[in-house]
Structure formats: C-alpha cells, structure tokens
Image (tube, grey):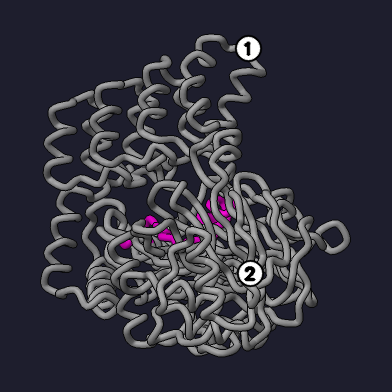
Amino acid sequence: MAAPVQAFCGFFVAKADSTLENTASQVVIAHSGNRSVFMMANDFQGDVQDFARIVPIPVLPSRDQVSVGDGALIEKLGAFTAPRLAQYFDHPCQQEYDWYRVIVFLASPIIVFFLLSWIWPRLNKLALAIALLFLTLLAVAAVPSFLNQANKAGGPNRTITQSMPAVTVEDEFTVGEYDVVILSANESDDLVTWLQQNDYQVSSDATTMLQSYIDAEMKFFVVRVNLGEFQKVGGQFLRPIVLDYESDEFMLPIRLGTLNAKGDQDLIIHVLSPTAYAEIANYQTLPVPTDAESKPRWPSGHELPAFVQSEFGDFYETMFQRTHEKYANAVFLEYATRIFGENIKCDPCAVAPEELPTEEDLKDMGVWWSEEFPETWITRLHVRYNSDTFPEDLRFQEVTLEKLAKKPGIAGRSFPEWAGVDFQARYVIRRPLGSAVCISRWRYQRTMAQAAENLAMLTGWDNGEIRQKMIADRRVNALDKQGQTKLHQAINENDLAKVQQLIEQGANVNIVGNQWRGMTPLVNAIANDQPEIIQRLLDNGADPNVSWRGEPILLWAIGFSDLTTVEQLLEAGVNDSTLQMVWETAQTSNNEDLIEVLQPYVNKQI
C-alpha cells in the first residue's frame, strides 16, 4: 500500500492526521472547439487509503464523461516529447584533407602539360592545353558532390454522509478504483465543513481560494480511492482520471495545488489539437533555450561539451531552474510537432522506435477527431509554479505555426525539415574521430572551447571546472579512427579488469562509440556474449533500454546470448512496452524457456 501511485491535478486532501504533498503532475488535454478531454496524473507518494483530491471544474459532467485511463500512455507521450541530446561524429581534418586532394587534382593538368611539353617539344601544345582544360572543367564540376561526402556525420507515459444545506451533492458514483462525488456550494466555509465532516483533510487556508471558484460558478470534482475496487484492478498503481466535457472555458485549475505544496511544483502539459499549437493566454509562453542551428557537417557554436551526455539530467534541471528564475511567471515550450496518422518523425528521437506513440495511442488519450481528420498537433508545456508566481489558473489559447515561428528565441531559427518538429528542446554534443593534426583541427578545438562557454552561460557552472571535465572526458572517452573508445576496446579484448579500471576513471558506459555500428559498450558486450562485463556495466549505470539498429537490446540479447543476459537486462529494468513486445514474441514462437524467464516480470507489470 505504500507504493507510489498516480493521480491528477488539483490538490490533495486526506484523512485527518495524514501528511500529503503535491510535487509533479502531468496532464494530457485533447482539445478542439469547446470540447476538452483531460487525462490527469501525478507523482503522489503515500498510502492509497489516504489519497483524495478535489478539482474545480467549469461544468457538471455526466457519469459517462468520467473514466479511468492508462498511465503508461502519459509516460509514453512524455518520453516522446522529452528534452533530448543529439550526438554527432566529426572528422575535423577530413574536409581539409579533401581540399588538399582537390588542389593536387586540379593542379595535376598543369604539371602534366609542362612535363609532356618538356618530353615532347614538338607536341601540339594548343591541343594538349584544350584537352587538359576540358578534363579540368569536368573535375571542377565534380568537386561539389565530392565535397559533400566529406566530414560524414550522423545524429544520433465510501460512503458519503448527508450534505449540509449550503452544499449540494450533484452526483455520486464509483468509476474504476475511485469513489467520485461532485459538489456545488454557495459558501466556502460550508464546503470546507462538509469536506471535514466527511473525513477529508482540508485546512481553513483553502477557504478564500475555494470561494473564488464558487463565485465563478464552478463545481468541485472530488475523488478518493475505493480500496475494494483498487484490489480488483491489481492494487499497485492508481490510474489517471479522464474527464470529457464541453465548455467555453479552456483552462486548467492549478491554484489549489499550492495549498499543501512544499516549494515549487512542476507541471507538464501536453495539448493535442487538430489544427494548431497551444500557449497560455494569461501568462507569457517562452521556448526553453535550445539549439536549432547545428548541422551534421559543422559545429554551430551553440553546442555543449561531450561529457554532458553522462550529466544530461543535472544539466537540464540546472538550465531550466536558471531560466525559470529569470522568467518566474513564464510557461516554457519544450516540444511542438505535427503528426499525420502513423507518420511520426523525430530527429533526434528521445525514445526507441517501438516506444513512439501510435495513432491508436492518441485515440486512447482522447483524440476523437482522428477518424475524420488524422492530423494532430502536439504541444508540450512545462510550468514551475507556486502561489506567488502563478496566482491565476492557466488559460489556454491556440497559436498558429506562423505565430510560433515569430516568438523570441525561435524567430530566425528553424529545425531542419527532416527533424519532423517545429520546436524541440534539443542539445548537441560532438565527438571527433581520430587524433590527426591539421589546421582545421585547431579551428575545431576553438569551436569546442565555445561549447564550454555555452554550458557555463546556460547553467552558471564554473568555466574552469567545465574545461577540466572536458579534458578528463577526452582522456578516457576519446574515439579512435574506427570510432571506438578504450572501453569498447577492452570489451572486445574481454578484459574485465580493464573495463573496471576505465569505469573507475570515468569512462562513459552509455557512449555511442562507433558511428557505423552505433553500439554502446553494453550492446558491444551483449554481441560478444560477455555476461560478467554486462553485469559490471549495468551495475555502473548502463542503460538496459537502448536500441540498436531499431530494435531494443533485449531482443538482440535473445539472439546473441543465452537467457542469462536476458535475465540481467530484466533485472536492471526494461520498459513495459519492450517487455510486452518480447513476451508476445515468446508466446508466438512458443519459446517455453523464454516464457519461463519473462513470466515473473510480466506478472509484476500486470
């Protein structure tokens, strides 16, 4: 009963003497016209028997407009739109070497002309010059396409007592694992008294705020857990509540959530629409600082040091908090993309291909228009708020692509068409291959020094410490001409002691070290069937959910090695969708040994 459970926006109320707090919430809103479908979840910690919530709503919903949803869908959508890190592999000297070849190639006709003129003085020099000129022109025409091959790179979800006279129980019913009561009131004092008499913990501090909702003629959607029903549906996690109603008010109440919060709260909002993106009407909506100019061929000057890969979570939190402190009353745009049916593009993708949301997933999240109009616009907004910075509830409005493109921080910059997005919180690191010496590499190193300044500017971290980390990262995670790190080499040599030594020295266990094969050290060890090295990598933070060549490594483990590796990955923690995929594959192929290994983990998932 003490496992984390998922609930939804509003604010916590509970049994007397229970301590609860609201921390981070997620909401998915499918909206078109005056109809909205809200799927609401959050990170509630505590006993489910203590859980209860009250949410102001502008209309009185009918029972068939209230349901329970699948929390995995919210996690899936959140992972798809999450801030992401792209990695490019560079050949800093390659283009310079290519230019040297071109110069020699173009100079060769002149050399040939004088050489032949010296050997055969009577040779028709005019005819020779014309022939060599013709060959030179052909070479010049071929140079652009030749140079395009240079510097190749790739980017890598009870019983209610009788109501008091001033409080009306509009409806009372059970849906899924929740008991629901919908209330209306004339005075907040009476509403608080009613809630307290029915075993909801509500402080007197809520009176003024509740009165403002009463004055706006809003109803109160109150839920708590029905323990009997909770056990029937598995008794592990509360599912999100889904509200589907029509109202001219396109808003999200967040103020009540500040009453029992400790410090700032985070709210991730996904708005799904058939025609436009969304922004907040009564607060400023700003894009988070991002890189929109990096290309696979050249550093842009807006990138980050490579060591950020292993500290990406810390980087983004620090950067976001710093930006929030600068614009405390702003809501931040983190992702904006358009999906047409099953045509989902993202570059770089923050999840494996099998983790991308499908058209059916969107339908399950409330996208009712997909049958007639298959396009869906997805907006991800991130708000960090408290009662001082956000004294009003959030009110939404549509924003066209043209208006979005003119926002400060986006104007004049655009993501490549192949990226499949109109905005994304994307950050870029580069890893040069080899250690060749050339003029271009000196220039390239100056560009990499700019990455340190970029990171210091975004986070406030000390520039000197950043440069020291860059030096340490290059020392242990540098790539050779074949695109392998020392850790990859140690794995290929099956040297467990060397692997441990490199990890202790700071080797990145999740680095994609080979641009042709795209292998992380863990994938490399699985391909070599090295269970001891696999376990050492997993114990030191290797990601068991990476994909290789478009497939999760759990699938590759089944083919590359025995079931020991499969168990190691399962124990380290595999995504539910990957586990389900492998489970279905095992059943289809009637692989009894694999089914036996998977069964305990599938049971936990259920």
Rendered residue at 50%/10% (across/down): 593
Q: Position of residue 448 (x, y in %)?
A: 26, 69
Q: Judge from the rendering whether residue 246 lies leftward or rightward of residue 486; answer left or right.
A: right
Badges 2 and 1: C-beta atoms under 8 Å apart? no
Q: Position of residue 333 (x, y in %)?
A: 51, 76
Rendered residue at 27%/48% (across/down): 479
Q: Nearer the viewer, residue 43 or 365?
A: 43
Which numbered tag is attached to residue 477?
A: none
Q: Amino acid at mark 2?
A: Val
Q: Position of residue 245 (x, y in %)?
A: 76, 68
- Magenta range: 73-94
Q: Nearer the viewer, residue 524 or 4?
A: 4
For the N terminus, give its image quadrant.
Answer: top left
The image shows residue 552, relative to residue 405, as above or below, that is: above
Image quadrant assignment for residue 581: top right
Q: Which residue is mark 2?
A: 271
Q: Which residue is mark 1?
A: 590
For the C terminus, give its image quadrant.
Answer: top right
Q: Amino acid at mark 1?
A: Asn
